[in-house]
Amino acid sequence: MLKQTEMCFCKSCAASTHHILVLVRKPNPFKNVKNRKRKEFIAGLIKGLMVGPFIAAMDDFSRHLICEKCGTTTIDD
């Protein structure tokens, strides 16, 4: 497993410390919708054409930074 760390300012520690980066997939907006697969495809296609496939794929994730010193989690959307 890859472990990626970043140096960030922690509000709880009041210092720059190492943080572990975890990517968490955002919930699906088409969860209980009729014709879900078709709507997911169309939304993904439009988003991919507008901003590019890599940025469109990364938009489905949120960044969670966990402080190695105190364990505080910060969520960046």
Image (cartoon, grey):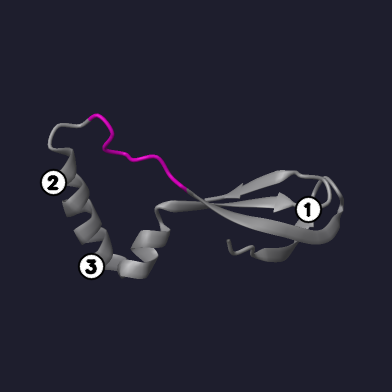
Q: At 74% from the left edge and 43% from the top edge, which residue is drawn?
A: 72
Task: Specify which label sits upstream in the sequence, 2 or 3.
Answer: 2
Q: Residue furthest front?
A: 1
The mark closer to the camera, 2 or 3, is: 2
The mark closer to the camera, 2 or 1, is: 1
Expressed as whole percent of the image width and height from the top left, the position of residue 56 reads: 34, 62
- Amino acid carrying label 3: it is Leu
Which quarter of the picture shows residue 45? bottom left
Classify mark 3: helix, strand or loop. Answer: helix
Horizontal arrangement in the rendering, residue 44 relative to residue 62 (left or right): left
Q: Are marks 2 and 1 in contact (CB under 8 Å)?
A: no
Query: Where, quadrant-wise, is the N terminus in this rendering?
Result: bottom right
- Amino acid carrying label 1: it is Glu
- Amino acid carrying label 2: it is Arg
The Cα atoms of the two marked residues, 3 and 1, are separated by 38 Å
User: Residue 2 in magenta?
Assistant: no
Q: At 21% from the left edge and 59% from the top edge, which residue is drawn?
A: 46
Mark 2 surroundings: few (<14), some (14-19) or many (≥20) residues within 10 A: few
Give the residue at mark 2: 38
The Cα atoms of the two marked residues, 2 and 1, are separated by 42 Å
What stretch of residues is rendered in magenta? Answer: 25-32
Give the residue at mark 1: 68
74 or 37, which is in the foreground?
37
75 relative to 2, above or below: above
Q: At 77% from the left edge and 61% from the top edge, which residue is drawn?
A: 18
Give the residue at mark 3: 49
Expressed as whole percent of the image width and height from the top left, the position of residue 28 reads: 34, 40
Classify mark 1: helix, strand or loop. Answer: loop
Expressed as whole percent of the image width and height from the top left, the position of residue 15 reads: 86, 57
Classify mark 2: helix, strand or loop. Answer: helix
